[in-house]
């Protein structure tokens, strides 16, 4: 039986004590009013016919190194009855291994050039990291389901240029929804299969974007180590970016280059495809609660314009 969203759960539910403890903990990061409001908004985003509408959370490989904080943060959501779809990469772990085997990682425009040997190692590393996260969650009593194939279908992005890299053509969300209906968090790797069953490597940020376009969740969360996006000159954290008013201006700034430019372009393209109520958050794993359940947040919020929620 799927756990009901927190505010609809019966008073005699077995998970009640747990829920109370967690809710009390949440109140310690924000006011009762804000916390309850966001709990209500996020809980009502999904129901049993549309169970994957709350959030897509993308976890960079580096974030997987702080597995305890990460598992604690995700478990928190699970305990209040929220089921994000979790997608992870494993870039740094993969680089560690291929470098130790004497291969130099090769990127073109941020995309990993993937030959057969690299893909073989990537697959092993992806599966290992996936299992590590699933185990860390299960250890905390949070049910999690590894989903390591069958979701992303892809064609070759450009075989001559990138090798075994996929461009996602189709997403089967049924395995994700089935996991949530069964009461488990779906934990996805960013590998795809071609029509003929060839496994293809997919950049995890791009996969997260494609996944979000398919699921149209309220929140798309990118967990990184820095805890947000930062102004290139002042070094200040950017609190909110309203793309409608700020995008063109931002892209013209001399300090907005390479990685930041790419990210902003991706966020803009993504949010243009989603309902106006959807927004992106860039945040550190241990600050996720504060970002989601308070008005002021803790990382960087990117949205199209003002007034996200009624
Ligand atoms: N909790 C709200 C949300 O998840 C607001 C977050 C505001 N965040 C920020 N960095 N200003 O949408």
Image (tube, rainbow, N blue to C red):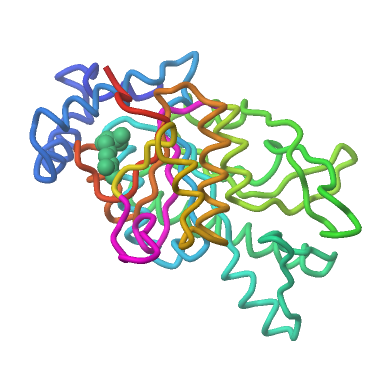
In this view, the residue in front, 89 or 243, is 243
| Figure quadrant of the N terminus | top left
User: At x 22% / y 45%, what residue is drawn?
Assistant: 290
Q: Is residue 194 left or right of residue 48?
A: right
In this view, the residue in front, 162 or 267, is 267
Magenta-span inclusion, residue 225: yes
Q: Quadrant of ligand 1?
A: top left
Q: Which residues are magenta?
A: 215-238
Q: Is residue 242 left or right of residue 199?
A: left
Position of residue 292 relative to residue 114, above or below, is above
In this view, the residue in front, 233 or 46, is 233
User: At x 74% / y 86%, what residue is drawn?
Assistant: 102
Image quarter of residue 7: top left
| Figure quadrant of the C terminus | top left
Magenta-span inclusion, residue 44: no
Position of residue 244 relative to residue 65, above or below, is above
> Main structural element of the magenta stretch: helix, strand or loop?
loop
């Amino acid at each position: 039986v799927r756990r009901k969203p927190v505010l609809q759960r019966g008073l005699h539910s077995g998970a009640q004590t747990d829920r109370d403890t967690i809710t009390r903990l949440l109140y310690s990061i924000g006011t009762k009013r804000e916390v309850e409001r966001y709990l209500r908004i996020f809980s009502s985003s999904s129901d049993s016919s549309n169970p994957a509408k709350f959030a897509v959370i993308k976890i960079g490989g580096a974030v997987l190194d702080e597995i305890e904080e990460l598992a604690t943060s995700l478990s928190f959501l699970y305990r209040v009855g929220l089921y994000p779809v979790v997608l992870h990469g494993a870039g740094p772990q993969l680089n560690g291994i291929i470098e130790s085997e004497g291969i130099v990682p090769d990127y073109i425009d941020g995309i990993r050039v993937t030959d057969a040997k690299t893909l073989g190692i990537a697959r092993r590393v992806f599966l290992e990291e996936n299992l590590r996260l699933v185990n860390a969650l299960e250890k905390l009593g949070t049910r999690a389901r590894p989903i390591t194939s069958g979701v992303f279908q892809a064609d070759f992005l450009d075989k001559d240029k990138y090798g075994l890299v996929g461009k996602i053509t189709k997403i089967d969300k049924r395995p994700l929804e089935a996991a949530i209906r069964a009461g488990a968090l779906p934990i996805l790797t960013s590998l795809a299969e071609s029509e003929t069953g060839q496994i293809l490597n997919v950049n995890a940020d791009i996969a997260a974007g494609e996944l979000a376009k398919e699921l149209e969740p309220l929140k798309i969360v990118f967990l990184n180590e820095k805890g947000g996006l930062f102004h290139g000159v002042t070094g200040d954290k950017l609190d909110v970016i309203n793309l409608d008013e700020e995008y063109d201006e931002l892209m013209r700034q001399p300090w907005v280059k390479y990685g930041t430019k790419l990210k902003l372009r991706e966020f803009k393209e993504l949010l243009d495809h989603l309902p106006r109520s959807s927004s992106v958050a860039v945040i550190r794993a241990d600050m996720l609660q504060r970002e989601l359940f308070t008005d002021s947040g803790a990382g960087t919020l990117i949205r199209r314009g003002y007034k996200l929620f009624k």
